Image: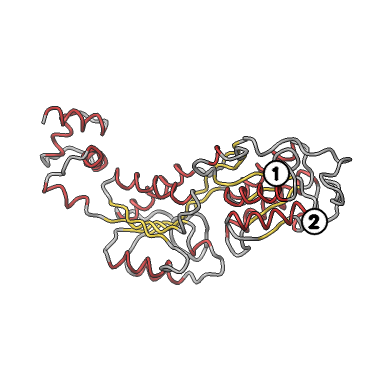
Amino acid sequence: MTARLADIAAQAGVSEATVSRVLNGKPGVSAATRESVLAALDMLGYERPVRLRQRSAGLVGLITPELENPIFPAFAQIIGQALTRQGYTPVLATQTPGGSTEDELVEMLVERGVAGIIFVSGLHADSTADTERYARLQGQGVPFVLINGFSEKVDAPFVSPDDRGAVRLAVTHLASLGHRRIGLAVGQRRFVPVQRKIEGFVASMAQVFGMAEKEAQSLIQHSLFTLEGGQAAAGALITAGCTAVVCASDMMALGAIRAARQQGLSVPGQVSVVGFDDSPLIAFTDPPLTTIRQPVAAMSQAAVNALLEEIGGTPAPHSEFVFLPELVVRGSTAAGPAPQHPAQEGRPVPGSAEN
């Protein structure tokens, strides 16, 4: 037991005496410290004392879209770890094409008595979706927090990246490389993050190039948040003479690289591509992807903290916690082609007003 106490204490970052007090149910230990010790027990594979097991019976639901986009497993992993450290058991519920809807997943989680729910990029991000479903959830006494997407109609804490700022970082970076005709490949307009990225793009093109809103809007292509969607959107932008494409996700950016190569163009030699997310393994693509890093760890921890405050009876304010993104420059962006040398015969000169 002495060796075990030492192991648990080291894992939890507390003294052996504190571990002993927790295991024996003694007072004088904060709730956070107690949960850290219990989480250390779990991580080291030790069985919790029977009298302490009920403390960790709380389930927290985590609802995500499909897991093919690696950013969603990244959120799930960090949120799950943060919940486990606090003694909660995460329950991952994933939407899949033809599978359960968000409402069905919520019903399933509520029936199982979850203490709260965290939504990642759910219907709350769809400006056309009925927000009454969240009012009903509140009426059932289930606290929840929403990541990515904001609605004034939903009385709950929101956690988001600065989508406008993210696009501004990308446009400024590409402009510094000499690109003048920059396109934006995004998802469907009804999604709040898409609307914000468009606002950031239009404002940035006006600020950096003095471009009119109508012309900036002509450099935006809507598609799906998939590799194929990015390929279709970027293909249209490149055909229209864009020498650089900013994408709303890393998956779309990989599609943009494919689109450029299909047109016989090199990345980044003739077309530069910027992604969004900095998904796991994206640094190892060919070429390594320049992208806007979504602060997943900070956002996940903030969402967990807000939810636990709600569960603990201290409601978090109905507000949006906005986190600043970071530009990560890798190998998919480079100097833009000289204006007097169009990238391909028949294509408008970069920087021209043609569309």
Residue at image position (29%, 58%) is 115
Residue 84 on image: x %, y %: 30, 46
Considering the image in quadrants, where does the N terminus appear? top left
Where does label 2 land, which residue?
Answer: 215
Q: In which quarter of the image is residue 32?
A: top left
Q: Is residue 127 left or right of residue 36?
A: right
User: Residue type at mark 1?
Assistant: Val
Residue 89 lies, in percent from the top left, at: 28, 52
Crowd rating for badge 2 (residues with CA inside 10 Å; few <14, some 14–19, many 20+):
some
Judging from the image, what secondary structure is the residue with disc 1 in? helix
> In percent of the image, x 12 and y 44: which residue is there?
49
Alpha carbon of mark 1 to alpha carbon of mark 2: how far?
Answer: 15 Å
From the viewer's side, name the closer residue of 87 and 139.
Answer: 87
Q: Tag 2's secondary structure?
A: helix
Q: In the rendered view of the protein, which quadrant contains the C terminus?
A: bottom right
Contact check, label 1 and label 2, Cβ < 8 Å:
no
Task: Give the labeled residue for mark 1.
Answer: 171
Looking at the image, tell me whether mark 1 or mark 2 is earlier in sequence order.
1
**Is residue 134 among the parts visible in the rendering?**
no
- In the drawing, does residue 192 fall left or right of residue 101? right
